[in-house]
Image (tube, grey):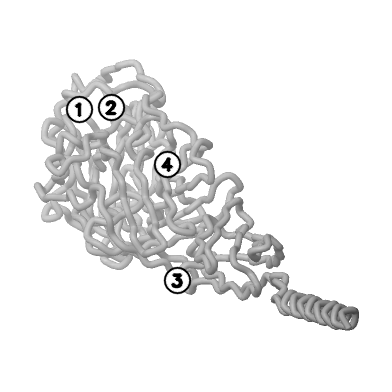
Amino acid sequence: MKKNSFLRLSSLMMLVAMASMISFTSCKDDDPVAEDPIASFQYTVSTENFLEVNFSNFSQNATSYSWDFGDGNTSTDENPVYTYATSGTYTVVLTASNDAMVTASFSQTLELTDPNSALALLAGETEKTWKLIREGVALGVGPDATQPFIWWSLTNDGSRPCVFQHEFTFNRSGEFIFNDNGVFWGENAVFGSTALNEVCFEATAANMVNSDGQDVSAWLSGTHSFEYDAVAGTITLNGTGAWMGIPQLGTSAESMVPEASKTFTASIESMGTYDQLTISYTYAELHWQFVYVSYANPADEPDVVTENQGFGEDLNDFAPTAFFNTFASTDAADVSYLIPSESAVAINIGVDDPTDPTAAKVGEYVRGTEMYADLKFQMDFDIQFDNFTSFSIDVYIPSSNTYAEGGLTTGITLWIADASQTQEFWASWVQYDVDPAEIVVDQWKTYTFDLESPSEGSTGTPKTRTDLDLVGLVIGGSGHAVDGTFYIRNFSFN
């Protein structure tokens, strides 16, 4: 009896143990198993800034994230917004991890290109600064775009160091910023009768007063705005005082005071280590051109030459006792030193007098359509005017010329300058203008000038200067859309 009871008890205990094992095993099989992560993302590029990318994370079964943006930068944000430094092609890798440190990766290649590549050449991806080129011709003037520097040009030779220090910055926001870096150049057209004419000076408001006493300080450092028309190839600067090139150049004419807006042509090209911006202002028979550059590596930019290396040579002084040209012939009896040299004027010696073919021969002054059609007389010495107090010339102005149209006038101007030691002889020449009321047509008239009484705005007099070696005669004005024929005789210093 006891044996049966013991057997029943043992069986019962075994059943309980088996039930417990079954129960324990069932509970363990019901625990959730962590799933492997799946990495995935999409991206969108900002419509306002093509370098800004919004990443949307679509990963599954992940609790942490690691982004590699392909440019050396990373992030652990779930949905980062990242701004690249420059355009290009980048491979972005997202690594998603779960709590068990199981990882999965997903990558995409994205290409960031500027939607406005033309504007990018001008203003960069955020901004771009331009300066006058320091190797080669930086600026100049000529009759047209095919001969932009034929009349005058400037290089980084130390004669105008301040203009090579100016910075012009275009910002993708539309801002145009000029930085004068504390220096300014006294353009003759603006500062001609002031102490700051044709020199570099401190860029302060007190110094920015033009020849007429007007305030031109708006040309100093400032922030303005711009519009770039890549199709038309033009830049418009908006804001009083905004400028590029030289300050007084405007859309259609020069101005001695700051203007509210100006437009000029512009072309941009990549030159390898730098980009080049060429701008120009074109008026009637006159073309100003400027070359600006922006280096990818500023360290590649040449230094500004700060010391003027000089131009030409100082000629020997000489005081002629006879200084004349009748234009009747090239014989010694008809010319003494005053011999026509290279110029844009065709001077024909020994032609018939337009009023009397039987009279002594005269000179024919044929002005072409060049902008600066001056008849020049270059000496090989610095003229000392010790023996002269005046000079005179006979001029015949035909009424048959087409005046008014194309800028042709009956005006008469004579000037004396130093061309042996400066390329900019016009900046400090001694000028004499005939009063328009005294000019007559269809008859000979003698015009006489006192050496000590040049026109207003001229620099010194021939009696006080010792550096003058070039004499010039201008008939017909300076606007040259049409030509004109005039006659001259008896040009003489007395």
Q: Secondary structure at mark 2?
A: loop
Alpha carbon separation for disc pair 2 and 1: 7 Å
**Residue corresponding to mark 1:** 462
Does residue 60 appear left or right of residue 344 in this picture?
right
Measuring from the top left, give residue 345's x and y in whole percent.
40, 47
**Residue corresponding to mark 4:** 153
Task: Assess whether mark 4 and mark 2 are in contact (beta carbons under 8 angstroms).
Answer: no
**Of labels 2 and 4, the one closer to you:** 4
Measuring from the top left, give residue 334's x and y in whole percent.
34, 32
**Of labels 3 and 2, the one closer to you:** 3
Alpha carbon separation for disc pair 1 and 3: 64 Å
**Of labels 1 and 3, the one closer to you:** 3
**Dot 1 or dot 3, earlier in sequence:** 3
Tag 4: Cα neighbours inside 10 Å, few (<14), some, or many (≥20)?
Answer: some
**Dot 3 or dot 4, earlier in sequence:** 3
Measuring from the top left, give residue 366's x and y in whole percent.
38, 52
Residue at 39% x, 59% y is 171
